[in-house]
Image (tube, helix red, strand yellow):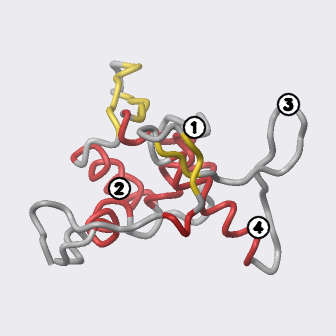
């Protein structure tokens, strides 16, 4: 299910890559160390095996994962997140924080490892070297899309 959205929008174009059912959950499994086909299949109850196979191929084509052969006969692969794939951790954390605030039943929360207290996301401007409030953020159109 590629290219669902033909909109000049970062969100729409990102959803074309990671917006299919199960895709974010597969990436999250990889981020959590479940890096083989079987370990992903075992830890994502309900995912059809053919769908997992298709999603892994798609994620490879999109440059989010790299298959690494770990057994020759029969060939078996483990899947390694690329830098682009690893960058999705921020998306996962944002979704977890949203869930803490809005789900009727919260399953996970983000805490600071050192003190075990809840954390918040903070935006930072490296140019000004300061933390900024989200109300200070402006979304600008890219150079290729002036409207």
In the rendered structure, find residue 55 and report the number of the disc placed on it.
2
Instruction: Residue at 75% x, 77% y: name it.
Output: 103
CA–CA distance between discs 4 and 2?
A: 28 Å
Decide: few, some or many residues near mark 3? Use Cα within 10 Å; few <14, some 14-19, many ≥20. few
Decide: few, some or many residues near mark 2? Use Cα within 10 Å; few <14, some 14-19, many ≥20. many
Does residue 126 lie above or below 138 as drawn?
above
CA–CA distance between discs 3 and 4?
A: 20 Å
Q: Nearer the viewer, mark 1 or mark 4?
A: 4
Instruction: Residue at 76% x, 72% y: name it.
Output: 101
**Which residue is label 1 attached to?**
34
CA–CA distance between discs 2 and 1?
A: 15 Å
**Which residue is label 3 attached to?**
114
Q: Is residue 143 left or right of residue 126?
A: left
Q: Nearer the viewer, mark 3 or mark 4?
A: 3
Q: Is residue 88 left or right of residue 68?
A: right
Residue 65 picture location, percent across and down: 35, 38
Instruction: Residue at 72% x, 54% y: name it.
Output: 120
In the rendered structure, find residue 5 and report the number of the disc placed on it.
none
Decide: few, some or many residues near mark 1? Use Cα within 10 Å; few <14, some 14-19, many ≥20. many
Instruction: Residue at 89% x, 41% y: name it.
Output: 116
């Amino acid at each position: 299910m590629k290219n669902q959205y033909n909109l000049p929008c970062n969100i729409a174009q990102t959803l074309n890559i990671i917006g299919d059912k199960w895709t974010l959950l597969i990436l999250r499994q990889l981020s959590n160390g479940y890096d083989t086909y079987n370990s992903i299949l075992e830890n994502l109850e309900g995912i059809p095996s053919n769908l997992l196979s298709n999603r892994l191929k798609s994620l490879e084509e999109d440059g989010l994962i790299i298959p690494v052969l770990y057994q020759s006969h029969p060939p078996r692969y483990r899947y390694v997140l690329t830098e682009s794939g690893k960058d999705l951790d921020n998306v996962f954390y944002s979704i977890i924080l949203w869930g803490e605030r809005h789900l009727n039943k919260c399953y996970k929360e983000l805490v600071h490892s050192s003190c075990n207290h809840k954390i918040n996301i903070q935006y930072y401007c490296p140019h000004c070297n300061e933390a900024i409030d989200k109300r200070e953020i402006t979304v600008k159109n890219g150079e290729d899309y002036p409207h």
